[in-house]
Amino acid sequence: MAFDENVKTEFKVVGTRVKRPDGIDKVTGRALYGADFNAPGMLVGRILRSPHAHARIVSIDTSEAEKLPGVKAIVTSADLADPEDDFFRDIRDNCLARDKVLYDGHAVAAVAATSRSAAKAAARAIKIEYEKLPHVTDVDEAMKPDAPVVQAGRSDESVPEGLSENVTSYFEFGHGDLDAGFAKADKIIERSFKTAATHQGYIEPHACLATMGSDGRGDLWCCTQGQYFVRTICSEVCGIEATQLRVTASEIGGGFGGKTTCFIEPVALALSKKSGRPVKIVMSREEVFRATGPTVSSSSDVKIGMTKDGRITAATAKLRYQGGAFPCGTVEFGAQSAFAAYDLEAVRSYGWNVLTNRPKEAAYRAPGAPMAIYAVESVVDELCQELGLDPLDVRLKNAARKGTLASYGPTFNDIGLVATLEAAQAHPHYAAPLGENQARGLSCGFWFNFGGNTCVSLNVNHDGTVGVVEGNPDIGGSRASISMMAAEELGIPYEKVRTVITDTNSLGYNDVTDGSRVTFAVGLATIEAARAAKREMCKRAAQIWGIDEEAVVWEDGAARPSGPNAGEHPPMSLADIAAVMDQTGGPIAGHHEVNADGAGVSFGVHLVDVEVDKETGSTKVLRYTVFQDAGKAVHPDYVEGQMQGGAVQGIGWALNEEYIYGEDGRLQNPGFLDYRVPVASDLPAIEPVILEIPNPGHPYGVRGVGETSIVPPLAAISNAVSRAAGVRMTELPMSPPRVLKALSGG
Amino acid sequence: MVRVKLWGSLRDLADGQEYVEVEASNFKQLLDQLEEKYPALKPQIKRGVSLALDGVIYREAWFTKISEDNEVVLMPYMVGG
Amino acid sequence: MKNLHVTTTINGDAAEFVCEPDETLLDALRNRLGLTGAKEGCGTGDCGACSVTLNGRLVCSCLVLAAEAEGAEVATIEGMADGDQLHPLQRVFIEKAALQCGVCTPGILVAAKALLEKNPDPSESEIRYWLAGNLCRCTGYDKIIRAVQDAAAEMRSA
């Protein structure tokens, strides 16, 4: 695709801190989220879940439950369709188990009844006979050749011989002569690390309302990061043609990647089809923990060699990720990201995706990258300590820059890592004094970002206002940034633009809100749609003036005659042209459809000061600064918000959050009391420092910002804790008991 | 001829080569040629691949122009959160 | 079990509803009265998304039985603005971008208002501890704390 020759650098609207258009709805309680929508005659749906980590389903007897008052439908996997593609079959089997339950909390059957209590009673009355099977929940255990096999026959052709069938895919990246590289090192450190599975932790549990008529037409209202993808999944899993299912995204109460797939929507549709009534399913928090989202847990070995003066000579990372009971792809992104921040002559990363009896992994903000970079940045930090080197100097000395052969294959074009590191070095935080039991940690982070399928419609209204129609749920203020880019391009005030997010039948396909893609890709399509509308408006003005179209330009929000033969005509504003559009050819609209590429990779550097209480093992985060290359920051408040929010999710990952499984393979802590996400009193101010290095792949230089910020905190905090405690930490989360154990020599 | 760099674990499926050469002027032709010359790559290509062209990552753009002057690197299909 | 009839006051207006004996106030507000501003994030009192006040006291409405609202005064996010006049906290939250997805926002606003009624000039630390029962997963709390500070300052000088 053709990128703009000149990325725009002068802005009137973009870069200001306008009020978001959905603000009033969200501060008054008027905004409608997934669970806030009702329909007449609606039934309550409830899902019955496996109490076992791994078991064969011998029989399901629903006869007693069906007889209970108020029960209108019961469904099992037999009520779902049979998609050809493994990808959709896995989603189906995760929504309702077929043959085997694969983890504690795996859905087995569902009921729809006239009340919450009737649904509960019916779920209890369903009799399921299980034959328990041996289970495995740890990634290293699951890789052993004699481990219980979660699903047989799921390994692809990349997996080397001799490993457990639980290993589903294998990846290797890198270049150079490792032996020669390590031979040049003055110091080599090799360490093993573990990170716990963490949950995206969105505050809004999954919720949906499904209506399926006997004519085969359905309507689905749900909280999701992508209504089109929900439609695709439900079409496959329920056997409905895409056009017969209209999916409308509610406001979304957080997602972070966890709402990019389906858990309940096909079930609600099947219940609605069977009962002939609307069915609403709202997950409880316990269900969210047991049966949606988490990210992978990981086990890794990293080996890095360094010269006395801080040059990395060779590096390897071996990454083992368990993504739950279905084949997942995440380790490849970890293996690609692990060494992305470094300019290395000899580097290799290896990754294994592994099945365990845990819930199916869902994407979580920069999926796969944080745990790999945590391990790498920990070893780099330890080398700096051992060799008495400044950790920022060492990162600068080895930093990837334009022309560096990236560890994942290509040669980097313009990237902002060095500028980000220099900003951190120059910041007062880096030189601030530290007290007793306090230390400073630092880490680099990296994420790819992407663009993807995007479709935008922009409509000019008679009164000179403009409506933008897009298809990506607004998860953190994107309606504001899209309206801003439309206003900027058209040269009209921000307040004159309203952006709405539409249903699947009102606009062409849009990819999910993920990959930090919306402000980049939807913004790009919006700018192009505005340009199309401007061309039409110039044409209308040319007709009114009786001059050639080519003799009209759009400047400062108005069509103006331009060139030697254009003549003298007063400029016509958007409102002037809109007022007479009926008379000059009818409605004026601009469209743009694209599968956007050129998102541009992103780097961040985080600095953190912590204090470790050596008696209790608890860690207090004292000061935190985030440096990130954001490209052009369209709405700086919301860019800062992404940087702060990602940092705090990373702090939780580093210090508190973990999925804890018992010997019985059951999740021990499916609630916010025991799965502890950071609360306000745990945290200091999070200072964001935005670097604006324009992305050449976007007309305004915009780059994705949503994901990179979760990557550096794991290592930044681990490095700080390790220095404060005087012992290298190698397992996340660094909860007080783990820190105490490390302090007492492991 | 376009020189395509394969990631490490794909090389075993392409006679151990780090770089393979194919006659192609766009992404689609490149994938077709890869499948034809190295059938063992087919399953991965079917699952999805991205393409880095002079450092810019493309996911599915069949008609992206490629010439022998470009640095072409095959990568796993990108996703995000 | 027989359903119960409850007579109560919500945001200053008389209200009645019928509920199951084990039904929570949150469910009654949301499902019986159509007041969906309070959200259920956990149902166990851990996240604060369902915060309302009951006779002036800040509570998690998921931990209160609907029947306990009998004869009580309940205040929810829906009653926070005065007609089209937003409460200063609501306005400053928008101005200072103190929300992203917004699902925790009603609970945080109700909790912050309860704080400022007790303590019009809280320190940053007091705000952080008061709001420790309100989880936000998007913002990292930073802009929320600044917004509460700014709104408090504005309310003090009004």
Image (cartoon, coloured by chain):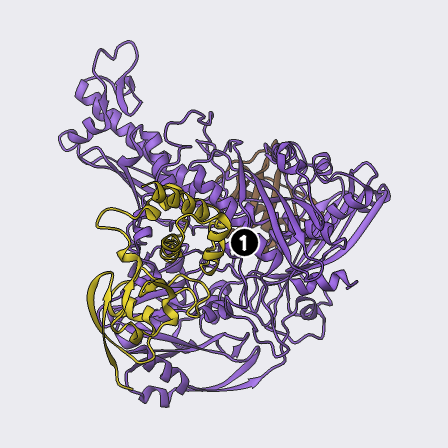
**Residue A213 in view:** yes
Vertical side of A100 occupied by A564: above or below: above
Residue A259's image quarter?
Answer: bottom left
Judge from the rendering whether residue A635 lies leftward or rightward of residue A377; answer left or right. Answer: left
Judge from the rendering whether residue C144 lies leftward or rightward of residue C25; answer left or right. Answer: right
Residue A177's image quarter?
Answer: top right
Colour in which chain B is drawn:
brown
Q: Can you give x and y, in whole percent of width and height, for residue A310 in the image? A: 78, 38
Say which residue label 1 marks: A649
| Foreground residue among A80 and C55 | C55
| Residue that appears at 52% across and 85% down | A130
Q: Can you give x and y, in whole percent of width and height, for residue A504 in the image? A: 32, 54
Q: Secondary structure at mark 1?
A: helix
Q: Amino acid at mark 1?
A: Gln
| Residue that appears at 59% across and 39% down | B23
Q: Can you give x and y, in whole percent of width and height, for residue A406 in the image? A: 66, 40
Q: Quadrant of the C terminus of chain A?
A: bottom right
Instruction: Tell which residue pokes out farthest to the left in this image.
Output: A583
Vertical side of A175 occupied by C41: above or below: below
Q: Return the chain for callout 1.
A: A
Colour in which chain A is drawn:
purple
Colour in which chain C is drawn:
yellow
Judge from the rendering whether residue C138 lies leftward or rightward of residue A122; answer left or right. Answer: right
**Residue A333 in view:** no
Label 1, residues with CA under 10 Å away: few <14, some 14-19, many ≥20 = many
| Foreground residue among A97 and C112 | C112
| Foreground residue among A321 and A586 | A321
Q: Can you give x and y, in whole percent of width and height, for residue A279 in the image? A: 30, 71
